[in-house]
Amino acid sequence: MSSKRPARDTGKLGGLFLGGAGGRLLPASVPLRWFAAAAFFHLWAWLALALAVPTWPQWHGGLGWPLAALHALTLGTLVASAIGASLQLLPVASRQPVRWPRLAGWLWWPFVGGLALLLLGMGLARPPWLAAGAAVLLAVLAAWGLLLALNLRGARGMPGVQAHGWIALTALVLLGASA
């Protein structure tokens, strides 16, 4: 006696898990480029630390490769990861598509270029480069903050996720104001 179980249709399991978010998701290339930038700037941080070794005993703060390494980790690795994750998960959590999806993809370019300029300005002690890179990064983070705010404002359900999003956005505004 063979007890045959009916075959389960697993073709739509992902769609069920995502709450039907398939149509709201950005192309995979958008969040993945942010994750690639995070990995790249993680390596940059290690390179900056290696460049700092000969002058480390004389370094007492200020511009230099140790500062560049710190910012490669914080802005390059952590911020790029956070933006990539938010672009990947927000359409699911907020139950709506990201507003201006082209802007979400385009922001990566000035982020990477601006951060590279900022890090080189720090490492090579070139304040004009640092200032130009910082201005570009502030503009990118302001645009991303606007995308996040628009998405959170129209979000339905998941109040815990929304609360965390608004807290993160508030922290971003405070960070921008302090820069």
Image: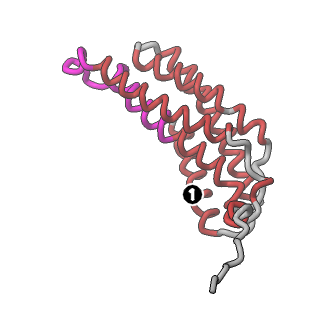
Residue name at image x 71 percent, y 39 percent: 104
> Looking at the rendering, in which quadrant would you find the N terminus?
bottom right
92 magenta-colored: no
Query: Mostly what secondary structure, the magenta segment?
Result: helix
56 magenta-colored: yes
Q: Nearer the viewer, residue 123 or 89?
A: 89
Q: Is residue 26 left or right of residue 141?
A: right
Residue 125 percent location from the top left of the image: 41, 14
Q: Circle 1 is placed at which residue position?
A: 167
Which residue, as the protein is rendered here, is positioned at the far left?
Answer: 57
Residue name at image x 25 percent, y 19 percent: 53
Residue name at image x 60 percent, y 51 percent: 169
Magenta residues?
Answer: 53-78
Q: Amino acid at mark 1?
A: Ile
Which residue, as the protein is rendered here, is positioned at the far front?
Answer: 1
Task: Determine the image quadrant of residue 71.
Answer: top left
Residue 139 percent location from the top left of the image: 65, 32
Q: In this figure, which colouring scheme has been used for the structure?
A: secondary structure
Q: Nearer the viewer, residue 70 or 8?
A: 8
Count of marks placed on residues: 1
Task: Determine the image quadrant of residue 46.
Answer: top left
The answer to whether any part of residue 62 appears in the image is: no
Could you say whether the residue bearing mark 1 is in a helix, strand or loop?
helix
Residue 42 percent location from the top left of the image: 43, 32
